[in-house]
Amino acid sequence: MSKIAVIGAGAWGTALAMVGARSGCTVNLWAREPEVVETIRRNRRNALYLPDHPVDGNVLPTGDLAEAVAGAELALLVTPAQHLGAMAVQLAALPDCPPLVICAKGIDRASGRLLTDVVAEALPGHPFAVLSGPTFAGEVAQGLPAAVTVGSTERSVAEKAADLLGAPRFRIYLSNDPVGVEIGGAVKNVIAIACGVVVGAGLGENARAAVVTRGLAETVRLAVARGGKAQTLSGLSGIGDMMLTCNSFQSRNMSLGADLGAEPERSRTPEEILTGRDTLAEGFWTAAAVTAMAQSLNVEMPICRGVNAVLHRGETVHALVDALIARRFREE
């Protein structure tokens, strides 16, 4: 049997481990929390992050990173985006690190860089790909149909990911544009917060459709400025992921935005809202990083800039909406 490693045993990492097991692989699933390792070993459940779905017997949990990657043909990096750089450094210190697939969605807030750049610095010349697309972990774990994109400048890495993970209910498309794939997955989280604000503030479906459409335009502009391809954003990692994340309260980012929109006068700060939540909304951190990246590249991203102002600069939801509506007329 082929062997893969999944680094990160949150909901998405556990779901991807189950995809690999169903595709016939032995999967070493690395978890930071000892209790996650123990509950999967004893009960075949990830009680902390994905309690409603049994974990396949081919998924072998471990807290030892070297053990997780030993003999693996591929390693999926599924740690939160803000921890991915530190994990890449640890992997670089191991003697036999396999090709990597970045499965986190975000931008490194400490450096303002794409996750592909973070990995490339930690492991110069090491082969890697980016996996992204419209997926909720619970549905993937349940075995419901899903499709994703794997982007890499090295075709062999993308093909290996498709061979090892592809299955009738988990369809993989290949792309040679990892930058476009990655930016689509990162920016949609910020746009989803904006859509949540629209819903929470009761601004209507017309407004949400406008935010999604113009948010996609912002995403395309940033991707192209960073060397990606506009065409990539018309696929699963762009409009596909945007549609899913901006239209369901299963999205942690959209639900965060809804909580913000329901309190337009900021009776609670975004940090206070986050404190009461059990799950991580990557868009909270990505908003600042995307805004800074756009400014450095002279890319206009008013929705992302406005979300960042609400999250990190004390702006009110009413001021965000007024600022977007009051922008000057222009061609689409």
Image (cartoon, rainbow, N blue to C red):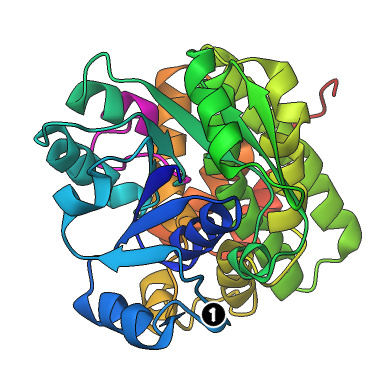
Picture quarter containing residue 96?
Answer: top left
Name the residue rendered at 66%, 65% in the picture: 197
Q: Out of 147 and 73, give the one closest to the viewer.
A: 73
Indicate the position of residue 164 as horizontal and vertical percent values: 54, 39
| Residue drawn at 44 percent across, 81 percent down | 44
Q: Which residue is disc 1 drawn over? A: 54
Q: Main secondary structure of the magenta part?
A: loop
Q: Provide residue 317's location: percent of width, then percent of height.
A: 60, 64
Q: Residue at (75%, 69%) from the top-left corner? A: 199
Give the x, y percent position of residue 23: 60, 50
Q: Is residue 147 above or below residue 35?
A: above
The residue drawn where x is 48% and y is 27% is: 294
Question: Residue 65: x and y, percent?
Answer: 18, 52
Quadrant occupied by the C terminus:
top right
Q: Secondary structure at mark 1?
A: strand
Magenta stretch in the rendered image: 105-118
Three-letter amino acid code of the residue under disc 1: Pro
